[in-house]
Image: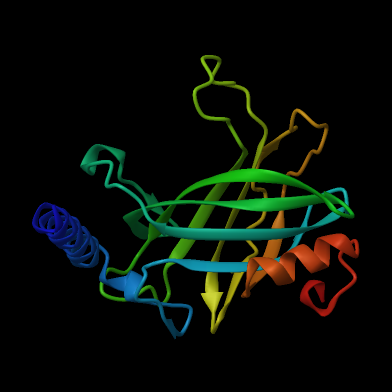
Amino acid sequence: MFGCLGKLVFWACLGLVFTWALLVLLNPWALHIGGRSTPLLYWHGAGTVLAKDGKTHPLYVFFFPGRPQGFSSGGRREGKRKSADLDGGGWLCVAPGKMERLELSGNMYGGYSTMEGSLFDFRLLEWRRGFVINRLPNRGFFDLAGTFHGPDLVMDRPNEQGIRFTSGVFIDNATATLKWTDYDEFLADCRTGGRTALSR
């Protein structure tokens, strides 16, 4: 019994190591994001998203290398060639203590061994529950794009689009500066309506 369990654990660990090594091979930049070591190949941070109408909302995101979509989905932006697909998620604070879950998809342009100077763009969609037949093709979303300035991800590209959320929240032409931080700090910021140091 123990022998079989031990083998299962061994092969599971071997599979994880192989998957990690493959991701590193395809995305060596993910080992060092925003000036810090990220051996788990993901980055997370929070800040305040500012919409065209002047409304602000605390925002938390995390992202990591996504499954490659193939050369047919490549492209360029601001003179940089697409170098990675991104997946992730996040939370948007729509009112004190009230949050909307988000699904993140995106791209990185420029870079391979390092993300220095690379452009990141995100599409943050309202969350779709699993096992739902209706896929909500008109889910609300907003886009962000920008680059790392030292440890901060400054999403300052203008004219990024957005579509109203089912809840009525509408964010377009959005900008944000995201700083490496934990979810708990974002949660505290949301509870106070964005009045903590995280939002400044």
Q: Quadrant of residue 13?
A: bottom left
Of residue 133 and residue 85, the one placed in the foreground of this image is: 133
Residue sitting at the far top: 133
Residue sitting at the far front: 1
In-image side of 5 versus 179 (left or right): left
Quadrant the C terminus occupies: bottom right
The image's colour scheme reads rainbow
Residue at image point 73% right, 72% down: 185
**Measured from the top left, where is residue 52 in percent x and y?**
81, 50
Residue at image point 52% right, 69% down: 147
Q: Is residue 103 above or below residue 29?
A: above
Q: Is residue 7 above or below residue 182?
A: above
Of residue 10 and residue 177, the one placed in the foreground of this image is: 10
In-image side of 53 versus 67 (left or right): right
**Measured from the top left, where is residue 107 in percent x and y?**
42, 52
Q: Is residue 151 above or below residue 61?
A: below
Q: Is residue 44 above or below residue 131?
A: below
**Measured from the top left, where is residue 134 in percent x and y?**
56, 15
Q: How many marks?
A: 0
In-image side of 83 versus 97 (left or right): left
In-image side of 148 versus 169 (left or right): left
Of residue 174 and residue 139, the one placed in the foreground of this image is: 139
Residue at image point 51% right, 29% down: 130
**Measured from the top left, where is residue 7 in percent x and y?**
10, 57
Residue at image point 90% right, 65% down: 192
